[in-house]
Amino acid sequence: MAEIIDVRGLSCPEPVLRTLEIIKKTDKEKLEIIVDTDTSKENIIRMINSVKWRIVEIKKDLDSYRIIISKY
Amino acid sequence: MKRFENFFATKGGIIFVGTIIGILGALLQRLGNPPNMGICVACMERDIAGALGLHRTEIVQYMRPEIIGFVLGAFLAALIFKEYRPRGGSAPFIRFVLGIFAMIGALTFLGCPWRTLLRLAGGDGNAIFGLLGLITGIFIGTRFFKMGYSLGKSQRFNSKFSGIWFPFIMILFLILLFIDQFSFEIDQKTILFYSFKGPGSMHAPILFSLSAGLLIGFIAQRSRFCTMGAFRDLILFKQFHLFLGIVALFLSALVTNLILNQFNPGFENQPIAHSMQIWNFLGMTLGGWAFALAGGCPGRQLFLSGEGDNDAAIFVTGMIIGAAISHNLGLAASPKGIGPHTKEAIILGLLICLIIGFTQKEK
């Protein structure tokens, strides 16, 4: 089961900051980030491309995105 | 490596947007906007406060079509690309207060972050101190984010209509501006206030200003262009993306100024600027700090307002009220220097940012 980070409704830079904090601490191999704006989605993709994690899948829900990431 | 579907989210996209803003900024000056003020979100909102009669400083009253265009361009882009999302409720009154003091800081320096870059690109050396202040303020802001600062989550509104009201008010402003154009010709009477001398009387043709505003609003919404975010992301994440946008803005404005013969390097007698460097620095420290705590530069707050973000709209409203307070109470600077009560207001603003920074935490 992936750990879920819900950053919906947070303004910049909190979605990226919170995801980064959890990436640093977690022992999980997989994380799921829920965002509600395209801006947050793009910012998280950009950040993931610069750490040792990768995007597994982005699922579009009704009014949010679920970004599944995993360790390389 | 995940690729972006949105061109404007790429490096090329943000550089393109910065370049367009820089060129249009310099061009708007050539076409009539005040020198080194082709685009200045703070100054233009201050002029709007004047046009509405919220302050009666006769030289800075004009319903700036660029600001209206920014909001409506972003609104249009958000509708077309399905990013229009009515939302709000993340500490609205705190954002209002931050907006007030952000404006007091910006009007001490005489410019928002966009004008800081345009002033530099026009050769105004005083803007170096504003820029250093801006970076310092944003740096302080990032320390609070590292300590867990948050204004909390916004709520999604159920009604699609909940996000139209800020764009709607912009349309009303535009209608008033157009009505005045005709009624002034007939009987010299207008509904809004207009300047007959000073910066408020200097403006590019309305349709050009509006078109430039609409174009910038549209592409800035797509690219998330943000001058505060540029420095914040660099400091917090060593992320250069938004920074490329402001470098492009500066360089393209510089080149356009050189071509149009608008580049006059120096410190003395720069247009709509003063040389009280400590206050140029501290004014923008306050501005940068408040923008950081509120999550966006003045321009970005307008684009977010166009997307249906009620919290950003409240920040903008705070800035407009802040401009009125600044001019009514002698806080705003002028080319002669700072106002009689600028110092107290800046110190108070810095203290307020400090308290908000320490007290607003999610957990």
Image (tube, coloured by chain):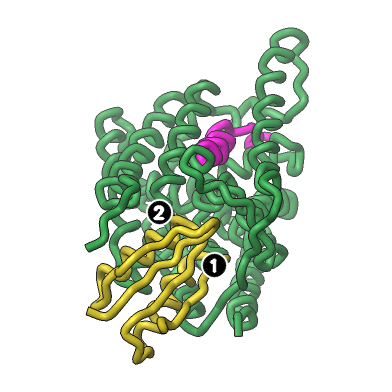
Helix, strand or loop status at disc 1: loop
Q: Which chain is green?
A: B
Q: Are marks 2 and 1 on the same chain?
A: no
Q: Looking at the rendering, which quadrant does residue B255 occupy?
A: top left
**Which disc number belongs to residue B182?**
none
Residue visible at 60% across and 81% down in the picture:
B361
Rendered position, B137 above or below B70: below
Q: Nearer the viewer, residue A42 or B34?
A: A42
Which residue is nearer to you in this view: B267 or B39? Answer: B39
Whole-percent x, y for residue B31 in the image? 43, 24
Vertical arrangement, residue B183 with respect to residue B100, above or below: above
Residue corresponding to mark 1:
A8
Taken as a whole, is the magenta stretch helix, strand or loop? helix
Q: Is residue A2 visible?
A: yes
**In the image, what residue occupies the spot 70% across and 43% down?**
B165
Amino acid, disc 2:
Ala
